[in-house]
Amino acid sequence: MTEGVDTEVAPSGPGCADCEGADPPGWWFHLRRCATCGHVGCCDSSPAQHATAHYRSTGHRYAQSYEPGEDWWFDYAEEAILVGPELAPPTSRPADQPAPGPSERVPPDWMLRLHR
């Protein structure tokens, strides 16, 4: 499973790169980190589902959870949970950053806006 995985590339930032770059900026539920390029995107429960969109636009099939205390991987091509190598730090969003986040952009009815 090492083909397409770069263990040296740093994550793109502490939050979803696409939500941060949107106008207006969005919010996310949980985060996923691309193991090829380090792109951090929001999970499929999040309103914008940027991690899956990143896979679809790039073909980068492997991602790791970017949540504190989680180290599981996902293979988008096979739709399977995997175990993978350790990636360059940091390995998660900051522990003091809330989920969902960022807190100032999360709507009061956020639970109703999640994809299930």
Image (cartoon, grey):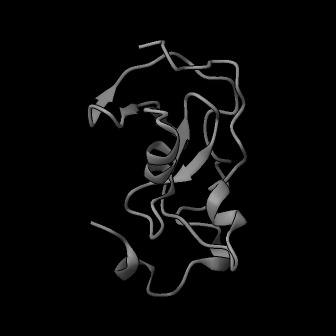
Q: Which residue is located at x 54 percent, y 84 percent?
A: 107
Camera-nearest residue between 68 and 62: 62
Classify residue 105 as left or right of residue 65.
right
Q: Which residue is located at x 49 percent, y 33 percent?
A: 60
Q: Can residue 97 be seen? A: no
Q: Which residue is located at x 44 percent, y 65 percent?
A: 46
Counting from the top left corner in percent of width and height, residue 10 is at: 72, 31
Residue 16's image quarter?
bottom right
Specify the quadrant that holds the N terminus: top left
The answer to whether 29 is drawn above or below residue 8 in the figure is below
The answer to whether 11 is drawn above or below residue 17 in the figure is above
Counting from the top left corner in percent of width and height, residue 83 is at: 38, 20
The answer to whether 61 is drawn above or below residue 88 in the figure is below
Counting from the top left corner in percent of width and height, residue 19 is at: 62, 65
Q: Can residue 72 be seen? A: yes
Residue 47's image quarter?
bottom left
Q: Which residue is located at x 43 percent, y 50 percent?
A: 52
